[in-house]
Image (cartoon, rainbow, N blue to C red):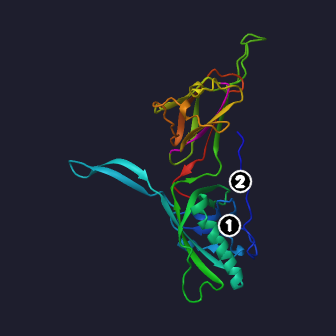
Amino acid sequence: MPLIAAPVITPPDTGGGGGGATPVPLPEVGTATASYTDPTGTVWPLTSPGLGWFTLAAGVSGLGAAPYDLISDPHPRGGARLRHVQAQPRAIVWPLHVYGDTHMEFIGRWRALASAFTRTLREGPGWLEIARPDGSSRRIAVHYQEGFEGRGTKGSAIVSDTAVLTLWCEDPYWSDPVPVTVHREASESVDFLDPFPSVSSSQVLGATTVDNPSDVTVWPTWVITGPASLITFTREDSGESFALDPTAVGHGNLLAGQQITVRTDPPQVRYQDGSNWSGALNWPAAVLWGLAPGANSVTFQLDGSGPGSAVDLSFHPRYETA
Protein backbone atom coordinates (compact mmCIF):
# COMPACT_ATOMS: atom_id res chain seq x y z
CA MET A 1 0.00 0.00 0.00
CA PRO A 2 1.31 3.53 -0.67
CA LEU A 3 2.87 5.35 2.27
CA ILE A 4 2.74 9.10 2.77
CA ALA A 5 5.93 10.47 4.30
CA ALA A 6 6.04 13.89 5.94
CA PRO A 7 8.74 16.17 4.51
CA VAL A 8 11.79 16.99 6.59
CA ILE A 9 11.93 20.76 6.94
CA THR A 10 14.99 22.75 7.91
CA PRO A 11 14.46 24.76 11.12
CA PRO A 12 13.97 28.50 10.66
CA ASP A 13 17.17 30.49 10.14
CA THR A 14 18.09 31.84 13.56
CA GLY A 15 21.65 32.79 12.73
CA GLY A 16 23.21 29.38 13.41
CA GLY A 17 26.30 28.16 11.67
CA GLY A 18 24.82 24.76 10.76
CA GLY A 19 26.57 21.52 11.57
CA GLY A 20 25.58 17.89 11.31
CA ALA A 21 24.08 15.79 14.06
CA THR A 22 26.68 14.44 16.46
CA PRO A 23 26.12 11.09 18.20
CA VAL A 24 26.24 11.59 21.96
CA PRO A 25 25.96 9.14 24.89
CA LEU A 26 22.42 9.39 26.26
CA PRO A 27 21.40 7.85 29.61
CA GLU A 28 19.36 4.64 29.23
CA VAL A 29 20.15 4.67 25.50
CA GLY A 30 23.86 4.74 24.65
CA THR A 31 25.43 6.59 21.75
CA ALA A 32 22.72 8.11 19.55
CA THR A 33 21.48 11.27 17.89
CA ALA A 34 18.20 12.98 18.72
CA SER A 35 15.74 15.23 16.95
CA TYR A 36 12.36 16.80 17.63
CA THR A 37 9.62 17.25 15.02
CA ASP A 38 7.10 19.93 15.95
CA PRO A 39 3.40 19.79 14.97
CA THR A 40 4.07 21.71 11.73
CA GLY A 41 6.55 19.05 10.53
CA THR A 42 9.67 21.13 11.18
CA VAL A 43 12.57 18.95 12.33
CA TRP A 44 14.80 20.38 15.07
CA PRO A 45 18.09 18.48 15.55
CA LEU A 46 18.92 18.25 19.25
CA THR A 47 22.51 16.99 19.09
CA SER A 48 23.95 19.48 16.58
CA PRO A 49 25.86 22.17 18.52
CA GLY A 50 26.56 24.18 15.37
CA LEU A 51 22.89 25.20 15.17
CA GLY A 52 23.13 27.21 18.38
CA TRP A 53 21.64 24.68 20.80
CA PHE A 54 22.47 21.21 22.02
CA THR A 55 21.37 18.58 24.53
CA LEU A 56 23.02 18.37 27.94
CA ALA A 57 23.04 14.58 27.84
CA ALA A 58 23.92 14.14 31.52
CA GLY A 59 20.52 15.55 32.52
CA VAL A 60 18.35 13.46 30.17
CA SER A 61 16.00 10.94 31.82
CA GLY A 62 12.84 9.01 31.11
CA LEU A 63 14.03 7.02 28.08
CA GLY A 64 13.91 3.58 29.71
CA ALA A 65 11.05 1.17 30.27
CA ALA A 66 7.52 2.53 30.59
CA PRO A 67 6.10 3.22 34.10
CA TYR A 68 3.36 0.89 35.33
CA ASP A 69 0.67 0.76 37.99
CA LEU A 70 0.18 -2.70 39.50
CA ILE A 71 -3.30 -3.55 40.80
CA SER A 72 -3.29 -6.39 43.33
CA ASP A 73 -5.59 -8.20 45.76
CA PRO A 74 -4.52 -9.34 49.26
CA HIS A 75 -3.86 -13.06 49.45
CA PRO A 76 -5.35 -14.86 52.50
CA ARG A 77 -2.07 -16.70 53.12
CA GLY A 78 -0.02 -13.51 52.97
CA GLY A 79 1.26 -11.29 50.23
CA ALA A 80 -0.89 -10.37 47.27
CA ARG A 81 -1.94 -11.57 43.84
CA LEU A 82 -1.35 -9.39 40.82
CA ARG A 83 -4.69 -8.66 39.17
CA HIS A 84 -3.97 -6.00 36.56
CA VAL A 85 -1.05 -4.09 35.05
CA GLN A 86 -1.66 -0.64 33.59
CA ALA A 87 0.97 1.34 31.66
CA GLN A 88 1.11 5.00 32.72
CA PRO A 89 2.01 8.18 30.83
CA ARG A 90 5.73 8.83 30.61
CA ALA A 91 7.61 12.03 31.50
CA ILE A 92 10.90 12.74 29.69
CA VAL A 93 13.35 15.33 31.04
CA TRP A 94 15.42 16.91 28.29
CA PRO A 95 17.89 19.76 29.06
CA LEU A 96 18.70 22.06 26.14
CA HIS A 97 21.51 24.59 26.21
CA VAL A 98 20.92 27.53 23.85
CA TYR A 99 23.56 30.11 22.97
CA GLY A 100 24.47 32.87 20.51
CA ASP A 101 27.30 35.25 19.67
CA THR A 102 25.07 38.20 20.54
CA HIS A 103 22.06 38.68 22.78
CA MET A 104 19.66 39.01 19.84
CA GLU A 105 21.05 35.90 18.15
CA PHE A 106 20.58 33.95 21.37
CA ILE A 107 17.10 35.30 22.04
CA GLY A 108 15.97 34.49 18.49
CA ARG A 109 16.97 30.86 18.95
CA TRP A 110 15.43 30.71 22.43
CA ARG A 111 12.09 32.05 21.23
CA ALA A 112 11.99 29.77 18.19
CA LEU A 113 12.65 26.65 20.25
CA ALA A 114 10.14 27.66 22.92
CA SER A 115 7.47 28.10 20.25
CA ALA A 116 8.32 24.75 18.63
CA PHE A 117 7.74 22.87 21.90
CA THR A 118 4.85 24.82 23.44
CA ARG A 119 2.74 24.66 20.28
CA THR A 120 2.12 20.99 21.13
CA LEU A 121 -0.34 22.27 23.75
CA ARG A 122 -2.50 23.78 20.99
CA GLU A 123 -1.78 21.90 17.76
CA GLY A 124 -1.24 18.29 18.82
CA PRO A 125 1.88 16.33 19.80
CA GLY A 126 5.37 16.59 18.43
CA TRP A 127 7.76 13.66 18.03
CA LEU A 128 11.00 13.03 19.87
CA GLU A 129 13.16 10.64 17.83
CA ILE A 130 16.30 8.76 18.86
CA ALA A 131 18.45 7.46 15.98
CA ARG A 132 21.13 4.78 16.27
CA PRO A 133 24.42 4.61 14.36
CA ASP A 134 23.04 1.72 12.26
CA GLY A 135 20.27 3.97 10.89
CA SER A 136 17.43 2.52 12.96
CA SER A 137 15.36 4.86 15.11
CA ARG A 138 12.50 4.99 17.58
CA ARG A 139 10.20 7.87 18.33
CA ILE A 140 7.58 8.92 20.85
CA ALA A 141 4.76 11.48 20.76
CA VAL A 142 5.38 14.33 23.23
CA HIS A 143 3.58 17.34 24.69
CA TYR A 144 5.41 20.19 26.37
CA GLN A 145 4.70 20.28 30.11
CA GLU A 146 7.18 22.72 31.65
CA GLY A 147 10.79 23.86 31.78
CA PHE A 148 11.34 26.64 29.24
CA GLU A 149 12.05 29.21 31.96
CA GLY A 150 15.82 29.27 31.96
CA ARG A 151 18.11 29.10 34.97
CA GLY A 152 17.26 32.53 36.34
CA THR A 153 20.81 33.05 37.63
CA LYS A 154 23.11 36.06 37.31
CA GLY A 155 24.57 36.23 33.81
CA SER A 156 22.08 33.83 32.26
CA ALA A 157 19.79 34.78 29.35
CA ILE A 158 22.32 37.26 27.95
CA VAL A 159 24.05 35.14 25.30
CA SER A 160 23.18 31.67 26.66
CA ASP A 161 20.80 29.80 28.93
CA THR A 162 19.56 26.29 29.66
CA ALA A 163 15.98 25.06 29.49
CA VAL A 164 15.23 21.81 31.34
CA LEU A 165 12.16 20.56 29.49
CA THR A 166 9.65 18.07 30.82
CA LEU A 167 7.86 16.35 27.94
CA TRP A 168 4.64 14.46 28.71
CA CYS A 169 3.85 11.32 26.68
CA GLU A 170 0.27 10.01 26.80
CA ASP A 171 1.45 6.77 25.15
CA PRO A 172 4.55 5.63 27.10
CA TYR A 173 5.81 3.31 24.37
CA TRP A 174 8.35 4.13 21.67
CA SER A 175 7.46 3.27 18.08
CA ASP A 176 9.39 2.53 14.91
CA PRO A 177 8.80 5.29 12.32
CA VAL A 178 8.81 2.63 9.59
CA PRO A 179 5.57 0.61 9.58
CA VAL A 180 5.30 -3.14 9.14
CA THR A 181 2.93 -3.90 6.26
CA VAL A 182 1.21 -7.10 5.18
CA HIS A 183 -0.56 -7.40 1.81
CA ARG A 184 -2.83 -10.25 0.80
CA GLU A 185 -4.67 -10.24 -2.51
CA ALA A 186 -7.01 -12.69 -4.19
CA SER A 187 -5.40 -14.07 -7.32
CA GLU A 188 -7.26 -14.33 -10.57
CA SER A 189 -9.12 -17.62 -10.79
CA VAL A 190 -7.92 -20.17 -13.34
CA ASP A 191 -9.47 -23.32 -14.72
CA PHE A 192 -7.68 -26.25 -13.12
CA LEU A 193 -7.72 -28.27 -16.40
CA ASP A 194 -7.45 -25.49 -19.02
CA PRO A 195 -5.07 -25.56 -20.79
CA PHE A 196 -3.34 -28.01 -18.43
CA PRO A 197 -3.55 -28.84 -14.70
CA SER A 198 -2.65 -25.67 -12.78
CA VAL A 199 -3.30 -23.84 -9.51
CA SER A 200 -3.53 -20.17 -8.62
CA SER A 201 -0.84 -18.21 -6.77
CA SER A 202 -0.43 -18.97 -3.05
CA GLN A 203 -0.64 -15.21 -2.29
CA VAL A 204 -4.35 -15.35 -1.49
CA LEU A 205 -6.68 -14.35 1.32
CA GLY A 206 -7.06 -16.85 4.14
CA ALA A 207 -4.95 -18.11 7.04
CA THR A 208 -1.63 -16.34 7.49
CA THR A 209 0.96 -15.51 10.15
CA VAL A 210 1.71 -11.90 11.06
CA ASP A 211 4.94 -11.30 12.99
CA ASN A 212 4.95 -8.46 15.50
CA PRO A 213 8.55 -7.56 16.50
CA SER A 214 7.31 -5.27 19.30
CA ASP A 215 7.72 -5.57 23.05
CA VAL A 216 3.99 -5.01 23.54
CA THR A 217 0.67 -5.38 21.74
CA VAL A 218 0.18 -3.23 18.64
CA TRP A 219 -3.13 -2.01 17.23
CA PRO A 220 -3.11 -2.28 13.45
CA THR A 221 -4.88 -0.43 10.66
CA TRP A 222 -6.66 -2.46 7.98
CA VAL A 223 -7.55 -1.39 4.45
CA ILE A 224 -10.01 -3.70 2.66
CA THR A 225 -10.39 -3.44 -1.10
CA GLY A 226 -13.43 -4.95 -2.85
CA PRO A 227 -15.10 -6.83 -4.28
CA ALA A 228 -16.49 -8.38 -1.09
CA SER A 229 -19.88 -9.03 0.47
CA LEU A 230 -18.76 -9.86 4.04
CA ILE A 231 -15.34 -9.33 5.65
CA THR A 232 -14.26 -11.33 8.71
CA PHE A 233 -10.89 -11.03 10.50
CA THR A 234 -10.03 -13.57 13.21
CA ARG A 235 -7.09 -13.88 15.60
CA GLU A 236 -6.87 -17.64 15.97
CA ASP A 237 -5.08 -17.92 19.34
CA SER A 238 -7.65 -15.83 21.22
CA GLY A 239 -10.69 -16.48 19.03
CA GLU A 240 -11.34 -12.73 18.86
CA SER A 241 -12.87 -11.54 15.60
CA PHE A 242 -14.83 -8.80 13.91
CA ALA A 243 -16.95 -8.82 10.78
CA LEU A 244 -17.94 -6.03 8.40
CA ASP A 245 -21.18 -6.19 6.44
CA PRO A 246 -21.43 -3.32 3.91
CA THR A 247 -25.17 -3.92 3.52
CA ALA A 248 -25.70 -3.03 7.21
CA VAL A 249 -25.11 0.65 6.35
CA GLY A 250 -27.26 0.54 3.22
CA HIS A 251 -24.36 0.40 0.77
CA GLY A 252 -24.68 -3.05 -0.73
CA ASN A 253 -21.75 -5.30 -1.48
CA LEU A 254 -18.32 -3.72 -1.75
CA LEU A 255 -17.57 -3.36 -5.46
CA ALA A 256 -14.22 -3.79 -7.19
CA GLY A 257 -11.80 -1.03 -6.11
CA GLN A 258 -13.97 0.30 -3.29
CA GLN A 259 -12.18 0.52 0.07
CA ILE A 260 -12.91 0.49 3.81
CA THR A 261 -10.32 1.51 6.43
CA VAL A 262 -10.54 0.01 9.92
CA ARG A 263 -8.45 1.48 12.75
CA THR A 264 -8.26 -0.45 16.00
CA ASP A 265 -6.92 2.32 18.29
CA PRO A 266 -8.93 4.43 18.55
CA PRO A 267 -11.68 2.27 17.01
CA GLN A 268 -12.79 3.74 13.70
CA VAL A 269 -14.35 2.45 10.47
CA ARG A 270 -14.39 4.72 7.43
CA TYR A 271 -15.49 4.26 3.85
CA GLN A 272 -13.27 5.75 1.14
CA ASP A 273 -15.28 8.99 1.07
CA GLY A 274 -14.72 9.48 4.81
CA SER A 275 -18.21 8.45 5.90
CA ASN A 276 -18.60 6.61 9.20
CA TRP A 277 -19.18 2.88 8.74
CA SER A 278 -18.98 1.79 12.37
CA GLY A 279 -22.51 0.47 11.98
CA ALA A 280 -21.21 -2.14 9.53
CA LEU A 281 -19.46 -4.01 12.37
CA ASN A 282 -21.15 -7.01 13.97
CA TRP A 283 -21.79 -5.36 17.34
CA PRO A 284 -21.79 -6.41 20.16
CA ALA A 285 -19.69 -9.46 19.26
CA ALA A 286 -17.06 -7.46 17.32
CA VAL A 287 -13.62 -7.18 18.93
CA LEU A 288 -11.13 -4.91 17.16
CA TRP A 289 -8.20 -6.98 18.34
CA GLY A 290 -4.51 -6.18 18.55
CA LEU A 291 -1.43 -8.20 17.62
CA ALA A 292 0.56 -9.72 20.49
CA PRO A 293 4.38 -9.69 20.39
CA GLY A 294 5.73 -12.49 18.23
CA ALA A 295 3.92 -14.66 15.67
CA ASN A 296 0.15 -14.21 15.35
CA SER A 297 -2.01 -16.69 13.45
CA VAL A 298 -4.79 -14.73 11.76
CA THR A 299 -7.41 -15.39 9.10
CA PHE A 300 -8.63 -12.89 6.52
CA GLN A 301 -11.96 -14.03 5.06
CA LEU A 302 -13.65 -12.07 2.29
CA ASP A 303 -16.93 -13.56 1.14
CA GLY A 304 -17.82 -12.61 -2.42
CA SER A 305 -14.19 -11.87 -3.25
CA GLY A 306 -12.76 -11.85 -6.75
CA PRO A 307 -9.84 -10.49 -8.76
CA GLY A 308 -8.58 -7.34 -7.01
CA SER A 309 -9.94 -8.22 -3.57
CA ALA A 310 -7.22 -7.36 -1.07
CA VAL A 311 -6.38 -6.78 2.56
CA ASP A 312 -3.58 -4.43 3.66
CA LEU A 313 -2.55 -4.48 7.31
CA SER A 314 -0.07 -2.00 8.76
CA PHE A 315 1.30 -1.11 12.20
CA HIS A 316 4.24 0.63 13.81
CA PRO A 317 6.15 -1.70 16.17
CA ARG A 318 6.10 -0.47 19.79
CA TYR A 319 8.91 -0.78 22.33
CA GLU A 320 9.55 -0.26 26.03
CA THR A 321 12.76 1.74 25.56
CA ALA A 322 14.35 4.13 23.13
Percent x, y of residue 204 = 66, 26
Residue that appears at 65% across and 40% down: 181
Whether residue 160 is visible, yes or no, is yes
Q: Residues within 10 Å of mark 2 (few under 14, many from 20)?
A: few
Please report contact status of discs 2 and 1: CB closer than 8 Å, yes or no: no
Task: Give how far across and how far down residue 251 sits, in percent.
Answer: 63, 26
Q: Quadrant of residue 3?
A: top right
Viewer can see residue 265: no
**Kind of residue sitting beneath label 2:** Ala
**Residue depicted at 72% across the width and 75% down the height:** 50
Disc 2 designates what residue?
6
Residue range in magenta is 217-227
User: Which amino acid type is shown beneath numbered disc 1?
Assistant: Pro
Looking at the image, residue 182 lies above or below residue 80 = above
Residue that protrudes farthest toward the right in the picture: 195
Please check the rendered image and state whether residue 49 is part of the magenta-colored stretch, yes or no. no
Name the mark on residue 45.
1
